[in-house]
Image (cartoon, coloured by chain):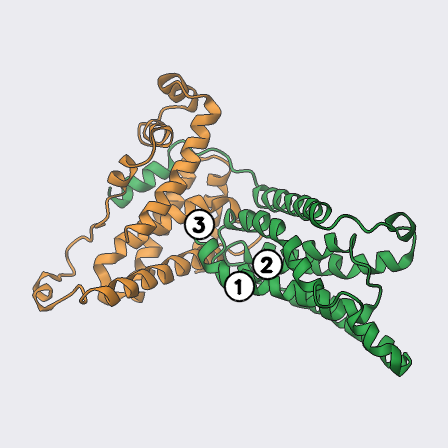
Chain colours: A green, B orange
Amino acid sequence: MKTDDLIELLATGVVPVDRNASRHRLGIGLSLAGLGSLLMMMWKFGVRPDIASVIPTPLFWATLAFPLCMAAGALLVTARLARPGAGVGLGWPALAAPVAAVWLAGIGVVATAAPADRLPLILGSSWQVCPFHILLLALPAFVAIFWAVKGLAPTRLRFAGAAAGLLAGAVGTLAYCFRCPESSVAFWGIWYLLGMILSSLAGAVLGPALLRW
Amino acid sequence: VLSAETRLRTLLVGGLAGDAAAYRAFLGDLTRHLRGYLRKRIPQLSSDVEDLVQEILLAVHNARHTYRTDEPLTAWVHAIARYKLMDFFRARARRESLHDPLDDHADLFAISDDEPSNARRDIGKLLDHLPEKQRLPIVHVKLQGLSVAETAQLTGLSESAVKVGVHRGLKALAARVRSVV
């Protein structure tokens, strides 16, 4: 087929394109991601038994705030990297800000605590499993977000994969907050973050293979 | 460059709104730019230029829903062209690590710049390998210019199946093009 014929083929019978198609696709992917991670959390771990009493507390919402901000930043970066030629722009500061805030707060909490309390503040009671639980909960989100990103024609596959993986990790962490008994900001800053970073690394490794189009 | 950006963008925006003539003009203009870009980038592989042009055109078409009209079109197109060019280099490197280099001294006299470059891979033939529910909608709607309703009547598919068939078929075609570099 000659190039002119291909042009003719592509142009014939074109239908108007939904200008919000990429937003819709990401929206669908993100909804499925949240749903999938929540279901995985309920199936594998179950909601923490004292959920009713912790929901009204500011501490619980502070727990949610960190992965929520990370998810927002990762979504910003993912949405950019998922489309050809869009720079990341404000994405990096949007990701760095919540990390910096949690680390500053964590360092403050640990520094002002009595020496004997410091290690428990950092390790909590679940540091060995926390990142891996997050990774497990991120799995359905990972699938949904990669599906959405693949349909948006990313051209820098490793970066797009890392961003999508981070977003999945943040969604997984968000779901894990309904299970996790830890209440120390120093704990979140290390183990939650580690779970998200592992997910992001998985995305960077798998991106070039999974996102090719 | 500025005027080309403006002209191409206007045409593409028309195309995205469903204006086939504007879209055809956009693809035609784009083809000329792509040829120039690729001939400069891979002068030693001139016989691959037309294949790459076609692959990039198909990619641009399949990705057209990701273009936002408030963003520079050059950056968007360039990212796609570069992506497909890198893909081509990777596939070529893989191929050449398995076999001897494709070119040898006998090729020397076959090279002539006046020769209109032809695509070596025939997208028309690849089309024949698509499943019927994708191939028929493309043949009727995109090649013969029938309407979606006429195609639906002719093939017994529903109208939405025809639209989906065209959409998925062109994506499948791009995937086949990719694997037959």
Report how far apart the C-alphas of labels 3 and 1 lie in the structure: 34 Å
Q: Mark 3 sits on what residue?
A: B8
Which residue is farthest bottom? A115
Residue A123 appears in which quarter of the rendering? Answer: bottom right
Which chain is indicated by disc 3? B
Which chain is indicated by disc 2? A
Report how far apart the C-alphas of labels 2 and 1 lie in the structure: 7 Å
Q: Amino acid at mark 1?
A: Ala
Q: Is residue B101 visible?
A: yes
Q: Mark 2 sits on what residue?
A: A165
Left or right: A79 as drawn, with respect to B98? right
Q: Residues within 10 Å of mark 3 (few under 14, many from 20)?
A: many
Residue A199 lies, in percent from the top left, at 61, 61
Task: Answer with mark 2 or mark 1, whichever residue precedes in sequence.
Answer: 2
Q: Amino acid at mark 3?
A: Leu
Left or right: A152 as drawn, with respect to A40? left
Q: Are marks 2 and 1 in contact (CB under 8 Å)?
A: yes
Residue B50 lies, in percent from the top left, at 26, 53
Q: Are marks 3 and 1 in contact (CB under 8 Å)?
A: no
Element on which disc 3 rests: helix
Element on which disc 2 rests: helix
Report how far apart the C-alphas of labels 2 and 3 lie in the structure: 35 Å
Q: Which disc is residue A204 wearing? A: 1
Quadrant holding the N terminus of chain A = top left
Report the front residue among A198 and A161.
Answer: A198
Which chain is indicated by disc 1? A
Report the front residue among A71 and A132.
Answer: A132
